[in-house]
Image (cartoon, grey):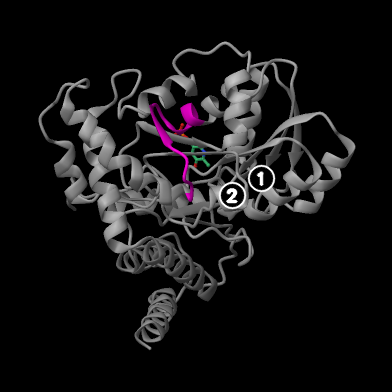
């Protein structure tokens, strides 16, 4: 088999378009030179529609977790009370960051695989009047759930004075986000999921309400101080040396996204979600989430009669295909397919087809091609309805 061939179908990092790869290989420029200013000037307006905001989107060098930590240190301080809605391991990470900073952290634990219920949040807030911020995950990557952040925002604002802070790392750029219209106060993402870039950039935007809190927050911070990033961004610059190669890539990736058109990008992801779900349902392999809770960017399967990790191992060995396993108590119990960013229905057909071979090789009695056919039919119906 080809040693170099890799098929990356995990929920991040994700494949990079060739044009983005080429953009990143440009020669280095000075971070205080006019060239970098122009690059940032080009990038700024193209990020806003992805967040659904008129506010500036700040760019920080760091992984997605840097964005989560930025959200925490800028808005709350030790002793403040917060609520973290936990639908999986990334909600848990938000809570752990708050706990590390000695924030009084209430955990609203939701069963993994389920979406957060605004009524539960309402009940909690009615009994806790001093909550300063509510943290939630838009797409919970560990389970493939897309939480209803629009409804959650409404609930938080109707029942408290708290800021509503959302981790959009594994879906921004692939699903709609209307930060301003929905009332999200801080929205963050990273580069290596739906944004079609390598890891290394964190993005964060804040509402006017949030800025008031950020400006007054007494929590010490330096590298992650949002005020520094905002003041520099006003002059099309960053407070510290940015990863310039990633900025070259970002500019090109944003160009690609807007050339396809955001509505088209969102519907491509919807279609891929439906194709994956149809493919596995056809083989009676249970899906972890309901259709309603499912994310367009990542899908988790919870097989009953084989070991998820046996399947993953054979796929990696035979085809260089990487799919993800489970985290925490779902370790070994589920497998997850990332379908976001530089990924198309053609990739989904390949993935399902290879997984069917993998299933056969680990001894599952399945009919080859059945899942592929279900996904093909979905694709055909979709493209026919598009033509009308
Ligand atoms: C990937 C991811 C992160 C950030 O992880 P890093 O490894 O720090 O980039 C945060 N939240 C969610 C929901 C994610 O999927």
Q: Tell me: is circle 1 under 8 Å from ligand 1.
A: no
Magenta segment: 52-67
In-front residue for pair 140/241? 241
Q: Indicate the position of residue 154 as horizontal and vertical percent values.
A: 71, 51
- Name the residue at 82% across, 29% down: 130
Q: Are marks 2 and 1 in contact (CB under 8 Å)?
A: no
Direction from residue 91 to residue 264 in the image, left or right: left
Q: Nearer the viewer, mark 2 or mark 1?
A: 1
Q: Indicate the position of residue 184 as horizontal and vertical percent values.
A: 60, 44
Q: Which residue is mark 2?
A: 333
- Name the residue at 85% across, 33% down: 129
Q: Secondary structure at mark 2?
A: loop
Q: Which residue is mark 1?
A: 87
Residue 60 shown in magenta:
yes
- Name the residue at 74% across, 44% down: 156
Q: Secondary structure at mark 1?
A: loop
Residue furthest to the left in view is: 27
- 257 relative to 210, above or below: below
């Amino acid at each position: 088999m080809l040693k170099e061939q890799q098929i990356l179908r995990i929920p991040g990092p994700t494949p990079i378009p060739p044009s983005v790869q080429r953009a990143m290989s440009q020669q280095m420029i000075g971070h205080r030179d006019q060239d970098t200013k122009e690059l940032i000037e080009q990038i700024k307006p193209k990020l806003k529609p992805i967040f659904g905001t008129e506010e500036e989107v700040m760019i920080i060098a760091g992984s997605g977790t840097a964005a989560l930590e930025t959200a925490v240190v800028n808005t709350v301080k030790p002793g403040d009370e917060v609520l973290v809605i936990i639908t999986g391991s990334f909600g848990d990470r938000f809570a752990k960051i708050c706990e590390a900073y000695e924030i009084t952290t209430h955990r609203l634990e939701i069963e993994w695989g389920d979406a957060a219920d605004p009524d539960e949040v309402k009940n909690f807030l009615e009994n806790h009047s001093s909550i300063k911020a509510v943290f939630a995950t838009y797409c919970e990557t560990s389970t493939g759930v897309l939480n209803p952040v629009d409804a959650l925002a409404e609930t938080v604002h109707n029942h408290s004075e708290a800021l509503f802070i959302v981790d959009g790392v594994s879906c921004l750029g692939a699903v709609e986000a209307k930060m301003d219209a929905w009332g999200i106060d801080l929205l963050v993402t990273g580069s290596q999921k739906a944004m079609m870039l390598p890891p290394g950039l964190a993005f964060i935007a804040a509402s006017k309400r949030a800025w008031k809190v950020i400006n007054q927050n007494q929590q010490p911070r330096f590298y992650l101080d949002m005020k520094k990033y905002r003041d520099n961004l006003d002059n099309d610059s960053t407070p510290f040396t940015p990863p310039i190669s990633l900025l070259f890539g970002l500019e090109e990736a944003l160009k690609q996204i807007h050339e396809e058109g955001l509505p088209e990008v969102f519907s491509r992801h919807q279609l891929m979600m439906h194709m994956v779900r149809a493919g596995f349902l056809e083989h009676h392999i249970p899906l972890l989430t309901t259709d309603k809770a499912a994310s367009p960017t990542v899908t988790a399967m919870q097989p009953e009669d084989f070991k998820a990790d046996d399947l993953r191992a054979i796929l990696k060995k035979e085809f260089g295909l990487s799919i993800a396993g489970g985290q925490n108590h779902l370790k070994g119990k589920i497998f997850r397919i990332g379908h976001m960013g530089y990924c198309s229905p053609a990739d989904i057909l390949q993935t399902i087809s290879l997984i069917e071979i993998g299933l056969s090789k680990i001894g599952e009695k399945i009919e080859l091609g059945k899942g592929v056919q279900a996904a093909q039919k979905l694709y055909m119906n979709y493209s026919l309805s598009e033509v009308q």
